[in-house]
Amino acid sequence: MTLTKTMNEMDESDIQIVPAGRDELAEVQSFLAPFMDDRQLLKRTSIEMELLLKHAFKATINGRIVAFCALEIYSKKLAEIQCLAVDEDYRRRGLGGMLVKCCVDRAREEKVKELMAISASDEMFKACGFDYSLPNQKRALFIQP
């Protein structure tokens, strides 16, 4: 599908940010596959993705997914932003921030006490109100066993 307007020419009615449905698994996987192939996102099984769709949001333009983000709730104490991806043609235009806000709002609705985000780029998350819980003291380290 060819888009006839650039993001700057579109008005807000062209962009739809809505919950992603569990019946959209194949479409979401297709959108996220290049990000996973490029190791920008962790690879997920279909079962893992299906579980994430319970609290997931997508941005669409003319019915095509151009951004996606999910909230994984671990407990009432902690949840995590997962699978934030924005099509390269639509980056730096606020879509990621809008999707993160949807996840923050959902976490608030679910009465989650703390929401974390693991990212290679923390500027956008800081603009959304995230910060290090113990600045200059501790950071999370990971290993893939």
Image (cartoon, grey):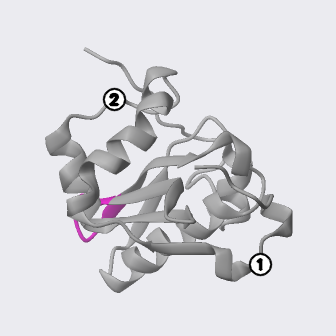
The residue located at (72%, 63%) in the rendering is: 94
Q: Is residue 133 left or right of residue 58?
A: right
Q: Amino acid at mark 1?
A: Asp
In this view of the protein, which residue sits in the foreground, 95 or 42? Answer: 95
- Give the quarter of the image for residue 80: bottom left
Q: Is residue 29 above or below residue 144?
A: below
Which quarter of the rendering shows the C terminus? top left
Residue at the right extreme of this rendering: 8
Residue range (magenta): 72-79
Q: How far across and how far down the image is residue 98, in percent? A: 61, 69
Dot 1 surroundings within 10 Å: few (below 14), some, or many (20 or more)?
Answer: few
Q: How far across and how far down the image is residue 40, in percent? A: 53, 29
Q: CA distance from mark 2 to mark 1?
A: 34 Å
Dot 2 surroundings within 10 Å: few (below 14), some, or many (20 or more)?
Answer: some
SS category of the residue bearing label 1: loop
Q: How far across and how far down the image is residue 106, in percent? A: 39, 77
Q: Is residue 73 above or below residue 111?
A: above
User: Is residue 130 part of the magenta span, yes or no?
Assistant: no
Lower position in the chain sequence, tag 2 or tag 1: 1
- Give the quarter of the image for residue 37: top left
Q: Is residue 28 above or below residue 128?
A: above
Q: Is residue 41 left or right of residue 127?
A: left
Residue wearing tag 1:
11
Residue wearing tag 2:
43
User: Is residue 75 part of the magenta span, yes or no?
Assistant: yes
SS category of the residue bearing label 2: loop
Between disc 2 and disc 1, the foreground one is: 1
Q: Amino acid at mark 2?
A: Lys
Q: How far across and how far down the image is residue 131, in percent? A: 64, 57
